[in-house]
Image (cartoon, rainbow, N blue to C red):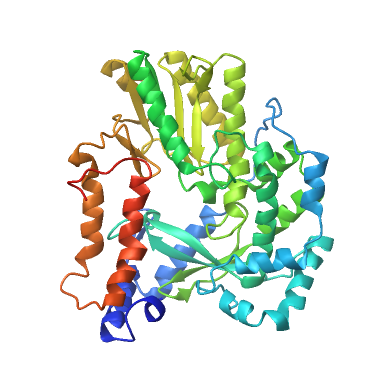
Amino acid sequence: MWLKDGDANTKFSHNCIKGRWRRNEINNIQVNGKQLKEEVAKLKEEVAKYFQELFIEDKWQRPKLDGINFKQLSQTNNELLMAKFSEEEVKNAVWDCEPTKSPGPDGFNFKFIKTMWEDIKHDIIGFAQEFHDHGKLVKGSNASFIVLIPKVENPQGIEEYKPISFIEVMFKILSKLLANCLRKVLDKIIGEQQMAFIKGRQMLDEVVIANEVIDESKRKKMQSFLLKLDFKKAYEKVCWDFIDYMLLRMGFTTTWGNWIKECLQSSIISILINESPTRQFPISKGIRQGDPLSPFLFLIVAKGLNGLLLSAVDKKVYKGVRIGNGDVMVSYLQFADDTIFFGEASEENIQVIKCILRTFELVSGLKINFEKSQLMGVGVKEDWKKKMAYTLHCKEGELLFKYLGIPIRGNHRKLAMWKPLVNSFKKKLASWKGRNLSLGGQITLINSALSNLLVFLMSAYLIPKGIL
């Protein structure tokens, strides 16, 4: 990217690469409360052991959601899902993938596949059709590297790293094909409260709705609460049996369920520590970040939480917040694993939420991180909020908070609201000060980082002249 859009092959660009490598290097890390500073082999073994335990399912009979109603796929939609993969679909799946992304254990990236497409396309199409006909993968074809990306500056514990998977090219093509098939039908079965990864639904809609609920509550002097949830390692905790159960409950064919089961059960992973892989090991739960299919499987899992809450609303045991003329009730918003509950401020509502969340934990395997979850109130007394936060074992929050990276209830006319944006600019620019960037390098920096920061917030709020 530097050679194409930025500087030439200079000492400066090489120093940038070395600096980034040094920041990402893991020399010592805390695993399960124990600081590891031993030799690399010991560190690798402990990290591999940690992730092996993380991805292993404790076998026990989880409860089911048999009493909850879910939307069903029609026969027409199932026929659409079961159709043979065409050459055009396979090619589109390949061309959807970024050509220069880091490769998986097979060592290939998509630049090779695209360059050599005419020579190898029959093998790739044949691989996809064989999976369609038999639903089985060759042993080892679903291996992946997991690289640990820091979530914070100067991470200390292993929990402060995000595990991203580098998947083999052939499986990634197959995963992309299945994801593209799911994309065509998910809007028929996923509730309108879930906005992520579905055509026609926008992330900013959730920000607008959240602001409207708070404004309406304040204007009509209603007592209401917001519960902003945080999931603990959401993707890694998902139970495979629950995915299979949800697919059947929503009307997917047994064949499609078996395809997904094969994609999950054939997974083998290895952790990259400073570009050196640990031993490989199989997994028995969780979905991988970096797999094109994973976001859609998580939507199906989250549908279980959606069904539980809507069932409670229908049975009038949970009351959301009514907005407009009172004919629209908002009780829940979700974008991937970012979730907010809205409800009337009553102890009964809080108890119902607690029951729903506990039930969802039991059936799905996901865990709510109550230490990072926040309860906020509109028009309620501080004593009530404190008591309810204690009931849920979560933190008390303030109404000025961030959701999906955008401030909720922020006053965009005040410069203070835009201070985090200014700080982000300074952070991006700090390492570049005093550097002799070429014109191309400056343009690349602006286009790739600074303009994106600004445009994202400006899509929700008007920016003051002082900040500009």
Quadrant the N terminus occupies: bottom left
Q: Is residue 356 above or below residue 286?
A: above
Residue 61 shows in this picture:
no
Q: Is residue 32 above or below residue 330?
A: below
Residue 465's spot in the image, x, y percent? Answer: 20, 46
Answer left or right for 438 relative to 226. left
The quarter of the displayed image where residue 401 is located: top left
Residue at image x 53%, y 17%? 318
Answer left or right for 307 relative to 207. right
The quarter of the displayed image where residue 226 is located: top left
Residue at image x 30%, y 80%? 13
The quarter of the displayed image where residue 436 is located: bottom left
* The residue positioned farthest toward the left in the image shown: 434
Residue at image x 36%, y 64%? 448
Residue 230's spot in the image, x, y percent? Answer: 43, 39
* Residue in the foreground of this view, choosing between 316 and 202: 202
**Label total for image:** 0
* Residue in the foreground of this view, choosing between 127 and 367: 127
Residue 129's spot in the image, x, y percent? Answer: 80, 66
Residue 255's spot in the image, x, y percent? Answer: 81, 51
* Residue in the foreground of this view, choosing between 120 and 298: 120
Answer left or right for 71 relative to 30. right
Q: Is residue 274 above or below residue 418?
A: below
Residue 305 shows in this picture:
yes
